[in-house]
Image: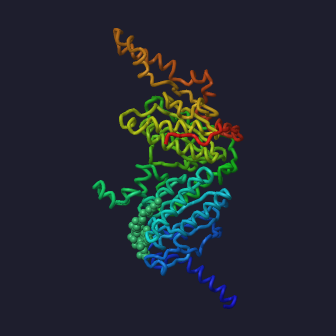
Amino acid sequence: MTLQEKFEVLDKKNAEALLGGGQVRIDAQHKRHKLTARERIDLLLDAGTFEEIGKFVMHRCKDFGMEKEHYLGDGVITGYGKVNGRLVYVFSQDFTVFGGSLSESYAEKICKIMDLAMKNGAPVIGLNDSGGARIQEGVVSLAGYADIFYKNVMASGVIPQISAIMGPCAGGAVYSPAMTDFVLMVENTSYMFVTGPNVVKTVTHEEVSSEDLGGASAHSSKSGVTHFSCTNEAECIEYIKNLLGFMPQNCEEEAPVLPYESTGNELRPILNTLIPDNPNQPYDMREVVYQLVDKGDEGFVEVHKNYAENIIVGFARIGGRSIGIVGNQPSVLAGVLDNNSSKKAARFVRFCDCFNIPLLVLVDVPGFLPGTDQEWNGIINNGSKLLYAFCEATVPRVTVITRKAYGGAYDVMNSKHIGADLNYAWPAAEIAVMGAQGAAEIIFKKEISEAENPAEKLKEKVDEYTQKFATPYRAAHRGYIDEVIMPEETRKKLMSAFEMLENKVATLPRKKHGNIQL
Ligand code: HXC
C-alpha cells in the first residue's frame, strides 16, 4: 500500500465513523424529532473545538452474530472541547448504533474521558440516548455500568457533572445520571425509569405510558429526578451552557466573575412596597430575587422550577459574582418547609458548597408543614437534611429575612447560629417561636379562658405578643441579626457583603465524612 493509499484508508474510516449506524438509522432518528449524537455535540461545543477520543473503538462481542456487525466508535462519541471558551469533556450516546446500548468498550470510552476530566479538573457533560445494557454482552455490560457509577461517585464534588436525557434511559442505567449534579430532560422524546410500563403493568396492574411514567414532566414535577424540563434538544443544550457559566471548572476553583459596572444607583425602591402589609397575604419571592440580582428576571436561572414550588433555588449574579439563591416562596403553601422542599434545597446547598458558590438565602417561612403525611414521610429526617447542608456549608453565606422566620424553620434557614456570615432583616420581619395568635393561645390560655370577654382578651394578648416578638429587633439586640435594613438597600448591601466575603476561609473538623440523614 502506498502512503497515499494509507491516507485514504484513514479518510475512509473517519467518514465511516461519522455515519454511526448508517444513514437509514440517522433518518429514523430525525423522524423521531431527535438529533444525532454528533449534531448534539456540535450544538453544545464552540465551533471547531471538539477533539474526539476513541473514534475507532469497536465492541469485542462474539455472540449472537455480533462478530459480523461492527460500527466504528461503538455507539458513543467521546472527547473534549470548549463551551464559551472553557474546557469540558463530553460523551454523547449514539442511538443509531445498537440503540445506543452500552457495551464493554463503550463503557471504557466513557470512563477514559471521566478519568481525563478528573485529572484535568473540568466538567463532564453526558448526552444520554440509550437502550441500556447491550443485551448480547450480558454481565460484561453490567460491569461497564458499574465502572461508570463508581467514577460518577469519585468525581462527585470534584468536577461538575451534568446529564441531559435525550432518549430512553431505563433500568439500572438511570443511576449514572441520577448521581450527577444536574439532570435535564427533553419533553416527549426522553424518559427515565427503573422498570418500564410493561413490568409496571405485570407487577402493580397499573396502565401507564412511558411519558407519564418517566417523561420530563413526571420527573420535573413529581419525583424531582430532573432539574430542567426542556421543550426541545436545542433548548436543553442552551440550558447546559448557561448553567456551566455559573460554575467553576472544579472544586479547587472559583466560578468566573463577570465584569460589572455599577450604574451608581443600586437602590431598588420597589422592594419597599413589594411585600403586602397583611402578613398573611402572599407575594412572589421571585419578584424579590429579580430586584436583587444583575439583569433582573433574565439574570436568574431557576433550578427545579416545577418541583416543591414552596421553595425556590437557582443561580444568579450579584455585582458579576456567581451566587446560589435559596428562597422560601410565600405564594405556594405560604412558603412552609416540607419534605420535598427540604430535600430540594438541601441538594442545591450542597452543590453550591461543593463548588465554592456563595449562598444567598431569602427567608419568609411560617414553619414546617404539619400533618400525618409529612410526619410519616419523614419530615424529621428530610428537614434535617437542609439543616445539615447549611451547617456544613463553608462558602460565604448571607441571609435576608423579608418577613416571617418562625420556629425551627428560623434556625434551619441559614440562621447566624448555624454558620451564616451576615444576617439581615427587613423592618417588617417577624422572628419568633411561632405566630402571635398560636403563641397567645398557649401561654395565656388560663387568663383568656377566665376573662369576662375571652375574645377581647385573646386579641389583647395577641397584640402584646406581636409588639414584643413579631419584629426583627429582639434578634437584632442579641446580634442574631447583624442589621435591620430598608428593603430598597438590600442589593447594595449584598454587593458589599459578597465582596467582603470573597476570601472567606472556613474548614470543617477533620473526619472521614459526615453522616447526613440520607
Ligand atoms: C442491544 C439494542 C438494545 C439493547 C435496542 N437495541 N436496545 N441492542 N441491546 N439493549 C437495538 C435494536 O435491536 C435495534 O437494532 C436498535 O437498537 C433500535 O431499537 P428499536 O427497538 O428498533 O427502537 P425503538 O422502537 O425506538 O425502541 C427503543 C427501545 C427498545 C425502547 C430502547 O429498543 C428497547 O426496549 N430495547 C431494550 C431495552 C432493554 O431492555 N435494555 C436492557 C435494560 S436492562 P437495529 O439493528 O434494528 O437498528 C439495563 C440494565 C442496566 O439496561 C443495568 C445497569 C446496572
Side of 360 relative to 223 (left or right): right
Residue at image location 49% in from the left, 48% down from the top: 304
**Residue 434 or 419: which is nearer the viewer?**
419
Q: Is residue 336 above or below residue 62?
A: above
Give the percent coordinates (x, y) of residue 71: 52, 77
Instruction: Give the quarter the ligand 1 occupies.
Output: bottom left
Please, is residue 182 above or below residue 36 in the view?
above
Residue 22 seen: no
Residue 417 in sight from this viewpoint: yes
List x then y, in percent, for residue 174: 46, 58
| Of residues 69 and 166, the one drawn nearer to the viewer in this rendering | 69
Viewer-side residue, 391 vs 485:
391
Q: Quadrant of the N terminus?
A: bottom right
* Side of 76 relative to 189 (left or right): right
What's the coloring here? rainbow
Question: Where is residue 9 drawn, in percent x and y?
Answer: 62, 85
Q: Give residue 516's position: percent from left, percent from top.
A: 53, 40
Tell me which corner region of the image, top left, top right, bottom left or bottom right, holds residue 348.
Answer: top right
Q: Which residue shows up at 59% across the image and 47% down it?
A: 316
Q: Nearer the viewer, residue 26 or 134?
A: 134
Query: Which quadrant would residue 437 be assigned to in this image?
Result: top left
